[in-house]
Image (cartoon, grey):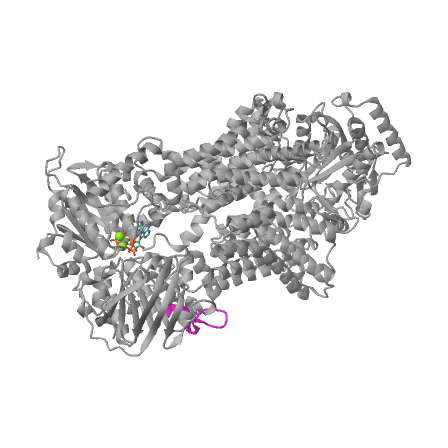
Amino acid sequence: DPAIIFDLGGKFDKSFNEAAFNGAERWAKETGGSYRDVELQSDAQREQYLRNFAEKGFNPIVMAGFSFATALETVAADFPDTKFAIIDMVVDAPNVRSVVFNEQEGSYLAGIAAAYAAKGDTVSFVGGMDIPLISKFACGYAEGFKSVKPEGKVIVNMTGTTPAAWNDPVKGGELTRAQKSAGSEVVFAAAGGTGLGVLQTAADEGMLSIGVDSNQNYLQPGSVLTSMVKRVDNAVYDAFTQGENLETGINVMGLSNDGVGVAMDEYNAALITPEMKAAIDEATAKIISGEVVVHDYMSDESCPAF
Amino acid sequence: MSVQSEAGRQATAAPTASTAPIDAPAIELRGISKAFGPVQANKDISITVKKGTVHGIIGENGAGKSTLMSILYGFYKADAGTIHIKGQEVQIADSQAAISAGIGMVFQHFKLVENFTVLENVILGAEDGGLLKPSLAKARTLLKQLSDEYQLSVDPDALIEDLSVGHQQRVEILKALYRQADILILDEPTGVLTPAEADHLFRILEGLKEQGKTIILITHKLREIMEITDTVSVMRRGEMTATVQTADTTPEDLAELMVGRKVLLHVEKKPATPGAQILEIENLHVVDEQGVERVKGIDLHVRAGEILGICGVAGNGQTELLEVLGGYQNGTGTIRLNGEEIDLTGKNSDGQSRRARGISHVPEDRHDEGLILNFQAWENMVFGYHHAPEYQKNRFLMDNAAIKAMTQESMTKFDVRPPNPKLEAKSFSGGNQQKIVLAREIERNPDLLLIGQPTRGVDIGAIEFIHQQIVHLRDAGKAILLVSVELDEILSLSDRIAVMFDGKIMGERLPSETNEGELGLMMAGIAEENPGEAGQ
Amino acid sequence: MNKMPKWADAVLIPLISILLAFLLSGLVIMAIGKDPVMAIKTMVQGAFGNSNNIGYTLYYTTNFIFTGLSVAVAYHARLFNIGSEGQAALGGLGVALVCLYVPWPHWAIALPAAMIGGAVFGAAWAFIPAYLQAKRGSHIVITTIMFNFIGSALIGYILLNYLKVPGSMSTESARFGAGAHLPTFHEMLAPFGIEFNKNAPVNVSFLIALLAAVGFYFLIWRTRLGYEIRAYGQSETAAKYAGINPVRIVVIAMLISGALSGLMAINNVMGEAERLIDNAVEGAGFIGIAVALMGRNHPIGIVLAALLFGFLYQGGGELSFWESIPRELVVVIQALVIMFTGALDNMVRAPLEKLFIALNKKKEA
Amino acid sequence: MDYLTIIQILDSTVRLATPLLLTCLAGLFSERAGVVDIGLEGKLLAAAFLAGAAASVTGSIWIGLLAGVAGSLAFSMIHGLASITFKGDQLISGVALNFLAAGLTVVVGQSWFKLGGRTPSLPTDARFGEWNLPFSDALANVPFIGPLYHELISGHTALTYMALLAVPLSWWVLYRTRFGLRLRAVGENPSAVDTAGVSVVRLRFAALVIAGVLCGMAGTYLASLAAGFVKDMSAGRGYIALAALIFAKWRPWYALSATMLFGLLEAIGNRYQSITMGDFTIPVQFMQALPYILTVIILAGFVGKAIPPRAGGTPYVKER
Ligand SMILES: Nc1ncnc2c1ncn2[C@@H]1O[C@H](COP(=O)(O)OP(=O)(O)OP(=O)(O)O)[C@@H](O)[C@H]1O
Ligand SMILES: Nc1ncnc2c1ncn2[C@@H]1O[C@H](COP(=O)(O)OP(=O)(O)OP(=O)(O)O)[C@@H](O)[C@H]1O
Ligand SMILES: [Mg+2]
Ligand SMILES: [Mg+2]
């Protein structure tokens, strides 16, 4: 059986971990198979749980989150016959599949959507904890926005520096209000539980918002412009489906293979104008073709668009 | 001596009154027992108090006096026994019930809210209606009446913490009167009072008695018993051992009843043979934290082998004088010990350096200063001297075994009961706590012993012992500076007496050539310095 | 004269309290539709079942011993140090700096240096609140809470801007050199022919923690400083009378407290992670409060309480691992244990006391 | 900084300060009665959870408020049981309650809603709406006072106005009523209250009931503002309220200023996350820590010694 370990945020974080969980559930439902999962409490448990699973013969073992890299490096070597999949990080081992996402590409599209939706030239971003991964989202978003409105302004705020920043919807709401009063019309939330407060406040304040990781359009129908979906669910689903014969190596999930994207559904149909749609499609094509390369913040920890 | 040990029990035989007879006793306790865990504080106690009388209760520390009265006041619940007030059996489940039965109590440690005003304290628990304003207004007028009637004047708007102890006590009495108490219990009321205040209190009590109120008075001072009570009960180890008419007994008899042996009520001492000057104080000033000048230029000296007694009404600078000498208050001026000047400020002015130079100090307040109540006796026995080399095992560790052995010895020597070094200080009675402090300070064999209120709240047996120890130290050629509000004590212990008033020395007297009256006047700042007497 | 024999006070009451806590926890487990007997089995098995599990239990225990001792030292001086969390975090920074910037040849040299680094940084983080309390009367409870927040912001900033490995996703420092690797129980016990799981994170720091507990005992009950700390804690006025300088005691007690918290980093940062991770303390500072209070501020009590919490942490983790019980259930069990052993112990004590008094009376009669 | 920005920052201050204020007043009643309450955080969380849960199920935030208050009250009563009835350690009890709330909200939430401890999102009509005071819209465009009235004074939720009203009310109760006198007395010297014939236990429980109600309101406010419960959403506000309480020297009006100050600092921190001055950029982390740093500075410089109620933290034990 396959197994999956969720990161400290917990499997119901309405975003990253939850997407992974959904992928596993979808697999279980479709194949009738069963799998095991566990949530972390502490950093020291990463290696412990990996081993627990490996020792009990679970295969493949998927872990949601870059923080598992260090633990996986040692464990993978100890269990050469077990296949592992790590999401959001590259671990160089013969029995590991590393799934990384080009979040910047999806965020770029979100930025374009924001640029078209905004009447003025200011949009904003609320991040959760201040870590490079979140800046990667912000940077792509800003680039996309500026590709449409080069003189425009993107306000970037982070909720905090501790893990509590993932679970403070009230503060998320306040940041959103502050951004609104600074002129922002569209806010992109990449902030876990905090993001729920952002989406809520945006709806209350008559702003548009953009969800993250999972499709969050339904959370505030008519107010969520779109969601920058990161198909972690697909990554998990794939890994589970391939089972013990999991293909190892690096697996980049970008626009080209539907790894990231912006969600279009009945909840936001009314918000998507034809021009916006056209611009998004065009950018998608250009990114896939390589004509446009969206800057990856993680590559040099800086962002030309800020 | 006509001891009616059976008095209590005889009273029990009186007809159980369903209809109260006119002259039913104000209070009748029958068979009261109370245990605190394994401690039997009261054993089958019966007592009858007639209306309109003053009834005294005496007994050693820990005999169970406070417990008995607290039961009557509903503070503790008795394990067994019944309470009859004016012939009616009453259930006193809490203080509210006691108050409605007309009982008021002034506890040994006042039950006042320090940062409330007098008025607020008085109405607390006895307010009329949900809003304070009418209650406060009513209390204000009533208080005025009461204080006029009984000479109990206090400023109704003063904060309790700003009042002297004597005034705080008045507030406690006013509280009881405001609640229309006609039975008033006072637990060691004079322990903290100056003689003048105590006299004032007794006048108030006389007044109350004349009004037909019944008063129960717990005290360690036989003089007070003789002076104002009509009957007196003696308690020992939780039992009521005797109840007698005050007129039929003598202090000596009472003391023997209490302690179970003959007690010396006056101090036996040889005349002093003063030697070299140990302590010299010149022009000492002390300003406290609030910026009030407490000591205003004092000159004093104490010789080896003499006891200098300082008397004065509390709050006239004696406390600060001791504190400066003991090293935990800063002052200005000159102090010399054995001819060498002492640092009054800076690094070497703390208690540790004072002790290192041979000054020992028995502080006025054993609970807050002299002892750590939660420390065991042996730990308390080196308190302040814990840096002394003889208590160190090596550079890092203290020699606990040696300290315990030393404590055991001192406790035996000073007759601390029980002589168990491992008991926490708080589980000793007041007198025994005081003996621990004394043992610690005297056994250091200091050149100068500072000693404040050595016998406050201590029973007669212990007082006798403590006084003997002080005299022994003097006879060993040490200098002793004694501060006490007890004129008796000052007069009988001191070789020389200085009176303090308003931060200054009003004058010095020899005990043989003065009396309570003169000292009392000087303490009030009235008498003038008589140049002929004190100069030497 | 005593109401109760010592053993009843020290052993019986905590035992009954823990039992009650587990009983109630069992009800909660039943309420969410699981089998409590199974759960307790899983927890015990998960915490002590094999050397791997024991290794994890002891690893957590080590953290809690350090923070528990830290809180207790301050408590003896009547200072309520809520700041262990932040002090331990800063200790982590100290340890990381020591380990990162010096190419240590051998752990035996690296460890003392790291201990100094952790202790100094932890103490430094306690110093300001201590100084403000002593000199300005600023309430130490607030200032230490504030310093927890400030500390986490500071560590985040330093990690992100100075220590992070460029190009890495995680907010964490580079891995320490091999010379800073602390021997785990596996490595320590192997020479004696004892097989201990090689993956368990428990390491030589555990022994250091026990030493710290012994040191704590001597400090508090055998030295002059400890005597003064306790005296000050019991009564400030009496301490002044005895010539004990309050400012000095407050500052020193807090420095020691901070240093003990900081020392925790040799376990989690140097011993386990071998690099500095963001939020490496993970609430151990707060658990330290419970450990100190439950351990009655005595080293033996603290070690036992730390072990109990280590058990709850590890056993609870296994419980959520194997039984798919939400990991927060462990927090509930912890809460109940703290409640019953810490705050509600009179509930157990009062009837027991009565029982013993009655028994004694019977014996006497 | 223009006028409108200031108004908006102040508006944000009021929103952020409201839960702090209610929680702080809760702590005030409890601690004034001599029961130290570091379990505020837990009560806040428990209330937020139950409020969110009840409001999402019933669709009425008022029922949510009832549930939130009930939850917080239950926690208060456990605290009372431990620290008043059984004379246990108040700090331990508080710590335990904080753990209990953190765990129980998620465990129960998961078993009820299967959303990982979250409650479903609250629709707009299951949240507190903004109250527009009379003439608010009419005055909106009047210069100066228009924005002041429309943005800042008007347009908050019912709970905000209740919180603000709670300040004078608390003051009045504490200083002008019999109950208040007794409550303050029991926090200073319980034996004085006892010997005056008033039940210490009952008074302290009454104080805890008030604390429970106020904390319940604060938790409900959080749940309403964030439109639902998310685990750990109290995010340390209980501790901040405790800090504010000490800051306020246990007095109602000061509590208002203290919580407003904390709210203001946070509002400013939210708005100006990084400030660039020439070549030097003040890091975000610094701005985020600023409220805490300022608290320490103010505490060190201006407040000095705050004297807590004297009997605080110690159970009232008559017989040992
Ligand atoms: N609240 C209490 N809890 C436990 N034991 C108590 C309590 N109060 C008094 N005791 C014990 O009961 C006994 C009687 O104490 P009590 O205070 O009545 O003595 P007392 O005669 O008033 O002494 P003193 O002259 O020192 O005031 C003592 O042994 C004391 O230790
Ligand atoms: N609550 C209590 N618990 C345990 N012992 C008590 C309690 N209250 C009093 N005692 C003990 O009862 C005895 C007498 O108590 P009391 O309070 O009357 O003090 P005391 O001996 O008169 O001392 P002082 O008059 O100096 O305060 C002492 O042994 C004291 O330690
Ligand atoms: Mg007494
Ligand atoms: Mg006494």
- Quadrant where the N terminus of chain B sits is bottom left
In front here: A229 or C6?
A229
**Is B389 part of what is drawn in magenta?**
yes
Task: Tell me residue D227's x, y (percent).
Answer: 62, 28
Q: Classify residue A285 as left or right of residue C226.
A: right
Task: Tell me residue D4's x, y (percent).
Answer: 66, 32
**Is C46 part of what is drawn in magenta?**
no
Relative vertical location of residue B211 with respect to residue D226 in this rendering, above or below: below
Q: Classify residue B463 as left or right of residue A116.
A: left
Q: Which corner quadrant of the image does residue D224 belong to?
A: top right
Tell me the residue at 12%/39% (across/down): B24
Relative vertical location of residue C90 with respect to residue B171 in this rendering, above or below: below
Task: Tell me residue A239's x, y (percent).
Answer: 78, 37
Q: Taking the image as drawn, is residue A196 in sight? A: yes
Query: Which region of the structure is painted magenta?
Result: B385-407
Outermost residue toward the bottom in this view: B276
In front here: C60 or B468?
B468
Q: Taking the image as drawn, is residue D116 in sight? A: no
In front here: B343 or D229?
B343
Task: Tell me residue C167's x, y (percent).
Answer: 79, 48
